[in-house]
Amino acid sequence: MKKGSAATVYMNQPDVRQALHIPDSVQPWLTFNAVMNAQYYNRSYFELDGELKFILTNFVYKTTNMRTLIYNGDADQVCNHLGDQWFIEELAANISLETHSFRRAWYYQTNATYQTQLAGFQKVFTNNLYLVTVKGSGHLVPMDRPAPALQMIYNFDQYIGTPLLLPITPTPLKPEYSGLGNCAETAYPAPSAMPPIPAVTIPAMEAEFADEVLLNTDPSNLTDKALADMITSLPGLTFSVTYRQFSGYLTSTVYPKNHLFYWFVESQNDPVNDPVVLWLNGGPGCSSIGGFFEELGPFHNNPDGQTLFENVYAWNKMANVLFLEAPVGVGFSYTDDTTYKWSDDTTADNNAQAIKYFFDEVFPNYKNNEFFVTGESYAGVYGPTLSERLVKMIDAGTLVLNFKGMAIGNGILSEYLQTDSMIPLMYGRGFTGLDDWQSLENACTEGNSNPVYYDYSNTTNLICAGASRAQLSKFDEEANSWYGSTDAFHGFPCFNDDAMPTYLNRPDVMEAIHAKLPHRRQCNLAYAQQRKYFDMSSTIHAIMSSATYTSNNMRLMFYNGDVDTVCQFLGDQWFIEAFVAERNLSVLYDRQPWNYQSAPQFLPTLAGYAKAWSQNVVQLTVKGSGHFVPMDRPAQALQMIVNFVKDQSNYSTPIFYVDTTPKPLLNAGTQNCSRKESDRIITMPGLNVSLTFKQYSGFLKGSDTHMLHYWLAEAEMVDPASAPLLLWLNGGPGSSSLEGLFFENGPFRISKDGQMVYKNPYAWNQFANVLYLESPVGVGYSYSTDGKLPQYSDDLTAAENFAALVDFFNLYPEYRTRPFYTTGESYAGVYIPTLSALLIQAIQAGTLNINYKGLAMGNGVWNKKTDMNSLFHLSYYHGQMTHQSVFYKISIFINYTTNTTHNTDNSTATT
């Protein structure tokens, strides 16, 4: 059976089509569509000098050090090397390219134990134009000379004669293919007839699947770093996500050894204009990703630690929210400095530089948006110390940032006042009785001192100190804070502390969010030994006294869940009251209720109490909430933060305009799959070896009605995350690019009977990620949704190939920063330059952000004139025509050619 027939048999097997995700309605696969070639394709380019001139002289080509490789099998007569050589030489002369390296032999070497052998010849022009022949090869170079072809393409950006460093040892066969075919069949007893068995009705597979999970991977207005950090798939999602997400590491130039992990979710409302809100958890040493999954982020963990459900009260409903894990040693953050020591000051310094790096280098498009620092608990230290450094940097002109304010929840603003207020709070809450209170009063009252406001933390009265310790020892602050809930119904606060690390340390999750190390336990307790700030008065004074605070109309909000006992509201209330008195601030409105209203048809409910002062300072309590306000009272917390960032002083203002309707859940069959994951090839029917690389097959959008089939084989011998991306196109027109996959440079070969697949040790995906695209519609599995096959032209093909690539880079945005090359052979000598010209135009216009590095064409259809002119000479040089015959035919041909560059005198001189 011919190779094309074997491939046709294999590709049209039902299990193969299913493995490649080919719909049943798509036409059978052919290696070559003769009808397309003869009836539906109108060739419009017969000379490609204009397109190559545009590419080779373009500003993008020159400034990005792009390369062009023209190679030919020297035994090919379809698109012969002599015609391509004449064409390239003439083109080089016309655009004033000089010879960089004169024609010389290049060699292939299997490994160090073997002698080198002649592989062909190479000439190099300026502007990185390479002209190469491959000795002994015909039209399909990667098939005829697979090893030299692999060495050539691997060394595309250097001397192609450099020996190949990749192993080419065949992959071991699976056990079922290792000689078992020689075993005789077991002789089993003959069966007897059985009674009829009722037919089993198998439910339709469609019932098991729903729409795929969609993630927003729009690459618009992003830096290379942001593109690399974009989250393109997230395991465990149960609903589609309409906003972009990014995660990775912020490594500033000031602290190059410290790498702070971040997760940034854009606003679900208006990301371009909505504010940027930084969130910091406390501890000290606790992960802000805890706030992401347990409090205000868009996702919550299910108890299984494998799936996620939606938080309809996520703060990114109306803001772009940045979660930062700090300091290093917390969560996914890490340092390369083995001598690094934590402290409150080093944490603030590192955080400030990370924020500067975030806005200057990663997301400069958000630099003018309003920016707020928020956090809770020990972020009562983190937030003010960071904010102080930011306003100093802004005042000094070293940071451009539209810093608008700070909001701290249940903050540890004063260790002393927290201790002093805890004793009367215990009495007021009923944890201690009147006898306890009176004994304390008798021990600690000195003169006319009020025991409610007594300074228990700094007393010199030993009797009072002993009595206060006795009172505090009766009370377990953590157990009574809902921090470590003993909820008998296994509610969210209880299970999530186990579910979150289980989820985050899944390898596929770590890969999706670009985490380099396993997630450490949520809180790093070692930090507590390095604490420095026990009262934040002077730090907050410094913030409010800065030029930025006044000129930019900054504001401060301090809020507390009123049943929290870890950082309870009374201590913070005492702190704020003393602080505003020191600054002589006036009361704008005295303590008053604020209400939450979920919808116009519902009555408002009491949400807490608020008090405001001049210079934009406000303190709120959140009724019924413990230490984690966004978790315990998520709806009230969302209304509170929205009113704060919108500078709405009336916190009872409802936010009916914020949509909190849950997004539709997806069926279990596909709820965890992105479009990319759905295209993953899980099994290869008939494959006789195990694979160590990933591959994908699906369809890319060439137009509104045209779907182009693609097959992506990731790199095998090198890390696919750093390997280049190669596009491969076969020619025809009408030939499937899967010819290249199965017959030339792809990872597979098909057995003669079309039933088995084995590995190609010279596959180009040994060192690169290779994308095979079947184009145009009607070729291979590519199809139209309207049932029409248009009259194709070279320009229309180029436009649809371009659109398909745009779709590809949206589907696989991680490839935008990889070196990208367009390659092909034969009529791809038209496909590739016309496509490359569109790519360069889009890059130059700023509408396409990819790392395009060059193009390589083998045995290409470049110029019909030089192809025809050279063919007679080539036939003569190959002994197919006599001297008299060839020049007789040339003389006849010249009569029809008015612009022939290469005449018989020149040819005669070379014979």
Image (cartoon, rainbow, N blue to C red):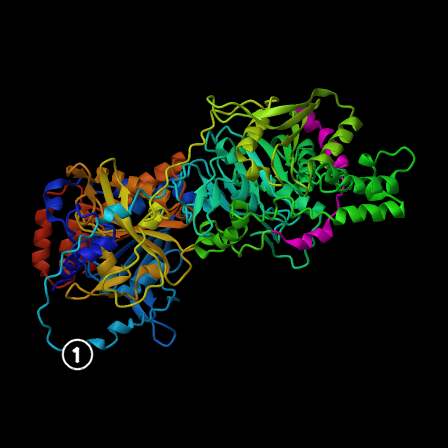
- Which range is magenta? 523-551
Of residues 634 and 25, the one drawn nearer to the viewer in this rendering: 634
Give the quarter of the image for residue 575: top right
- Residue 530 colored in magenta in the image: yes
x, y percent for residue 715: 36, 58
The stretch drawn in magenta includes residue 897: no
- Judging depth in this view, the residue of 231 and 129 nearest the camera is 231
**Residue at (45, 35) in percent of width and height:** 221
The 10 Å Cα crowd at callout 1, few under 14, some 14 to 19, many 20 or more, is few
Name the secondary structure under disc 1: loop
Q: Is residue 455 left or right of residue 597?
A: right
Image quarter where the N terminus lies is bottom left
Judging by the rendered image, the residue that carries numbered circle 1 is 186
Q: Is residue 243 visible?
A: yes
Give the amino acid at mark 1. Answer: Thr
**Relative depth, front residue between 519 and 908:** 519
Quadrant containing the C terminus in the rendered view: bottom left
- The x, y position of residue 249, in whole percent, is 54, 48
Left or right of residue 532, residue 671 in this image: left
Q: Position of residue 7 (x, y in %)?
A: 17, 59
Residue 168 percent coordinates (x, y): 33, 69
Q: Main secondary structure of the magenta part?
A: helix
